[in-house]
Every structure is written in C-alpha cells, then in structure tokens.
Amino acid sequence: MIQMKQIRKIYSTGKVEVEALRGIDLEVGSNEYLAIVGPSGSGKSTLMNIIGCLDTPSSGEYVLSGERVAGLDRNRLAEIRNKHIGFVFQNFNLLPYATALENVELPLLFGGVGARERRERAQAMLDKVGLGDRLEHKPTELSGGQMQRVAIARALVNRPAILLADEPTGNLDSAAGQAIVSLFAELFASGQTIVLITHDSGIAKLAERVVQVRDGLIVEDRRQAA
Amino acid sequence: MRSRYEFVKTEAALVWRLFKADAEHQRKRIALTVLAIAWGTLSIVMLLSFGEGLKRAFHRSKRGLGENIAVLWPGATTRAFAGLPSGRSISFRDEDADLLRERIPEIAALSREYAKRIGVTHGTKTVNARVRGVDPSFGPIRHLFPQPGGRFIDALDIADKRRVIFLGDELATDLFGDQAVVGRSVQINQSSFLVVGVMQPKTMMGMYSGPDKGQAAIPASTFRAMFTDAKVANFVYKPGNAAVADQAKAEVYRLLGRKYHFDPEDARALSIWDTREDQRIVDNIGIGIQMFLGFIGALTLFVGGMGVANIMYAVVKERTREIGVKMALGAKLRQVMTPFVMEALLMTVIGGVLGTCVSLALMAGIAALPLKGEAFDLLGRPTFSPGVAIATASILGSIGTLAGYFPARRAAGVNPAVSLRYE
C-alpha cells in the first residue's frame, strides 16, 4: 500500500530552514491498522500530509498503491487523493451548508460519478455508519459523534485504499470517542487499511502496529496484539 | 463531458445555498454590490439604447434623400482637351437624359431636374418656392412619396405636358392650411396647375438645394414648355445596385466626355455626389457613437464588477478551510474554482436582470412622453434591440466571470496541508 524510502521534508521560512522529516522509511501493507504517535512538533502531521498526498516530500521516494507520487502535478494528486485516500479530521471538516448526504456525495462528485449512483452509494455508506435516518440533516443538527460518522462515511464512500484519520476522537467526549474507535475496529475487521495519527496512547493501543515519531525520525515501530 | 455537466448541476444547487448563506452573512455588502451591478447595467442598457435610437434616426433621415443615389451636375474643365482650352463650362442638354439611360445599363433609373424659384399662388396667398421639372422616376429615386389619395408625376403627364403639380407637405400647408389639397389648383406664372399629390412628411439629413418639403414638382416637359430658355440643373440617378455604382460613374464621365469633349479623367468637368459615401460615414458615426456610449456604460459596470470581485476575495478567505477540505477529498483545481465563478456570475446576473428591468421600464416611460421636435426625433427614442441585449449580456457575463475568476484563482492557490490547520 505505502512504501516510503528516505522521506525528507524541509520547510523554509525566509532564512530559517526547518527539517520536519529527516529520512523516514515506512512500509504499510494491505489491511494493516497502524497508529502514528508522537508529541506535537515531532513531524507526525507532516508525515500524515505526505501520506495523504496533501504535501510532497522534499526528497525521497513514495509509492502509494503502486503509483509513484513524487513529481505529480496538483490535479493528478487530487485524483490520487480522491481514489486512494479517505480523510477523517479531528474537527470533522464537513461543509456546514450541505446535508449529511451531500457531504458524503462530495468525493464521488469530484470523481465524476453520476447523480443516481452517487446518491445510492452515499446512502448505503451512511446506513453502514448508522446514520441512515439522518440523510437530510445539516451538520449543525448533528452531535459531534454523528458528525464524525458522516466524515467517516465520506472518507470511505469512494472505497479508498487507506483510511487516514488525524486525531479522530480529539473533539469527542469519551463515549462518542469510544463508539468511533469501535467503528474503526469493525472497519479493520472487514479488511480496511487504517492509518491513525494520534498522541493519545490509549487510542493507539487499539491499533495493531504503533509507529513512534520523534524529531522527524521513526524511533520505534512495534506490532502489538489487538 | 457528462460528468462535467453533473458537477456543474450539483454545484449550482450548492452555490445557490451558499449564496443565500453569504447574503445572510453580509447582507448589506451584497445588496450594495448587486445594486452597483444593476446601476451599471442600467447605464449600459440606456446608453446603448440611446445609441441604437440615434442610429435608427440617422438611418431614417438619411433615407430622406433617397437610398444609394447619385446627383450629377455639370462642372468646368480643368484640363485642355482635343484642342479645347481648360476652364470651359459644361452644360447639359435635355436629350442627355435619354443618352445616359440608353447607353449606361448600370443606371437603373434616371430623372432630369430643372429648377426655378418662382411664386406659387393659391387665392391671395403666394409662396416663393423652388419648382422643379422632373421625370416620374424622380419620386422613387428621391423618396418623394405621395400621401394617400394623391400621386406623383406620371408618364402621361410628361407626354401631354400636363399642368399638374406635386407639392411638398410644408408648401401645401403654407398655401392651403389644413384643407384637402389634391384636386385643387395653384397658379404659377399665370397658368393654373392641378395639384395631383402631396408629399408624405420625412426627415432629411443630407440635401442639396433645400429640403423637399418646401418645394414643388411639375413634369419636365411642362417646365421646358413654360421656360424655354431653361437648362437642366442636374440629373439624379440610381445605379442597378451598389456594386456597379463606381462603374456607372466612370461610364457617365466617358460618355459625356466624348459628347462634350472633355477628358474622362478630368474629375471637375462634372460633379457627382455619390450619397453612398455619406451613408457609409453616417453609418460609421452611428456605430462609433454606440461604441463610445457602450464603453462608458461598460466602465460603470466595471466598477460594479470590482465590488463583486472584492466580495469574492473575502468569501475565498473565509472559506479557506472549506477549500482545503474539498481539495483533500480530491477536487481538481477547476472543481475548486467553478463554484466561486458561479457565485460571482450569480450576483452579476441578479444585478443585471434588475438593471435591465428598470431600464425597460424607463424606456417605456420615455416612449410615453409626448416629445416633439428635431432633437427628440434624433435622441428621444431609446430603442432596446436584440443587438443591445446581446452586447449587455456579454459585457455582464465577461465582467461577472472575471470578477469570479481572479478570486477563484486565489482559491485554487490554497495549500490544503496549510488550510486544514487554519483555525
């Protein structure tokens, strides 16, 4: 799924150069449940951006689902995100003026899927996350847990290779967070590859593999029994 | 293509909701901007419509002289030719009319024009008017059309040298007031003439020897019989079509040059007024005025467009995170930009429709006003034509698109990795 070799990322703000990633080697196979953990400033967000093709590495090689990502233009990267990556964010990032159904339809819309198929697939996905009765609700009419479910449905609707979640429970109370964590476990059980970025070791414990990042380097990569 | 249409259709629904949300959010700003667009549209539509009315008035009045006609006067030679000196005056003879008609097939119709300023009397009233002796073709060539119940000079009038007269509308009113005129008689030179027709009123822009409304026409043969020493003042003719006009002109020089012994290259030996030239100039002036007015209107509208662009820049800034989300979900640059352009166009279209409605109402109001006089004939009739509509729509469309495009380009420049962290 993911093959990274010697990934470096250097941000330069004026005269100062900051090396956020200093040579990351990472391989993620099919149907893995991986947690990337590390304190803030460790480079884990940068790593997530690069895995998600939101950003490109300064050097190194990144192959995602058999496709070399380096050097692609912005539209091609958008296509790759659309097809291979499903994002889940800490603050949900739903479009506030669109209904749950429309939010879930968005990736299909950008992928050029026709109206009827879009609706059917979005509806099925919302059913799957337990929101089949909230299709026409706006985000403001939903609870935090429900919003995050809509976001997960949106992330999965285009059947991505990787579900990439950035602190998905960070804005939820513990009950709602727990429900999301169980949903992830279910998805993993049904074959979904999941990459989770978190600083919450409690959440990370649930993953099958934990990668520690510190100062732009992987300092630990261990598998654990789920 | 299908998926592109799908995208635009779905986005249109979302854009409409977004616009309503924005309108709620910055109501005053959007209202003012829409008003600015409406005002710009109003000025552009009104100015273009005034221009159109002016152009049409030009067109109407230049037809007063006749369309695509030429007037031919004798001149004086400026070159020695065939042993004759330069500076010799040419004068036409009556039979030249037949010569020109027969020998120049490019000339479709031709009339002699004799003229004399003389008293025309009805009862105790005498008007000193220009009386012309002409052929029947003079009427259609020079657009002297009879009012209902009358006619112009005809072939029998010529053949029988009848004492019949066709009056300009102003002359008829001066002599007879409001009374019916056809069938009455007037005196010229102690001879009685039967009035056979009165000219329909018309406006004239170009003219020679004064407006037609104050003149009278009698058969050329009658004129010659009355004034035996009269010479043909000029001929008027109409070429078969505009394409052969230059050829006809050259033929006139060649033919008359041979008869009166002047060099066909000697332009001053004859004087030909080709009204096509003037019509072209008048047409170009009309188009020029309209373009100028349109340009001023477009400038006004441009200011409104700046307002739209300004709002869209603010909207892009406000929605930076949303743009990032869309990018993360796989929106291509075009798909990020389209909604912003659509929203700008939506604002422009709302303002445009508003402005157009107000201008149409204004024009209906102007049309209902009882405006008279020559200035109003030219200026008082703004006309909304399909051309004006197309020009307005395309200017509005391009300004709206531009007003959306530049902010949208800024949106496309958003870095998703950064904007998702944007709080």
Image: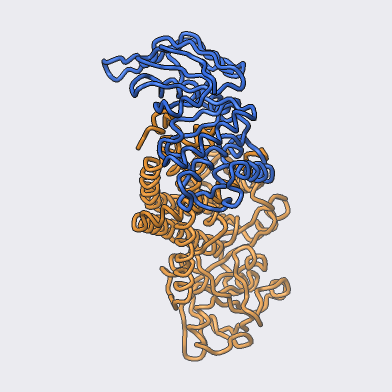
Colour given to chain A in the rendered image: blue
Asked whether, in this view, residue A44 is left or right of residue B255, the answer is left
Return the residue nearer the eye: B86 or B104: B104
Residue B25 position in % (x across, y down): 37, 54
> Residue at coordinates 49% horizontally, 62% vertically from top-left?
B53
Q: Is residue A43 above or below residue B331?
A: above
Asked whether, in this view, residue A158 is left or right of residue B383, the answer is right
| Quadrant of the rendering where the N terminus of chain B is positioned | top right
| Quadrant of the rendering where the C terminus of chain B is positioned | top left
Q: Is residue A149 above or below residue B390?
A: above
Colour given to chain B in the rendered image: orange
Residue B217 position in % (x across, y down): 58, 73
Q: Is residue B115 above or below residue B196?
A: above
> Residue at coordinates 42% horizontally, 32% vertically from top-left?
B414
Residue B254 seen by the camera: no
Q: Where on the picture, by quarter, is residue A161?
A: top right
Q: Where on the picture, by quarter, is residue B151?
A: bottom right
Residue A194 seen by the camera: yes
Which residue of the protein is positioned furthest toward the front in this rendering?
A225
**Colour option used:** by chain
Return the residue nearer the eye: A61 or B132: A61
Residue B287 position in % (x across, y down): 49, 51
Residue B328 position in % (x across, y down): 50, 32
State how many labels appear: 0
Return the residue nearer the eye: B115 or B334: B334
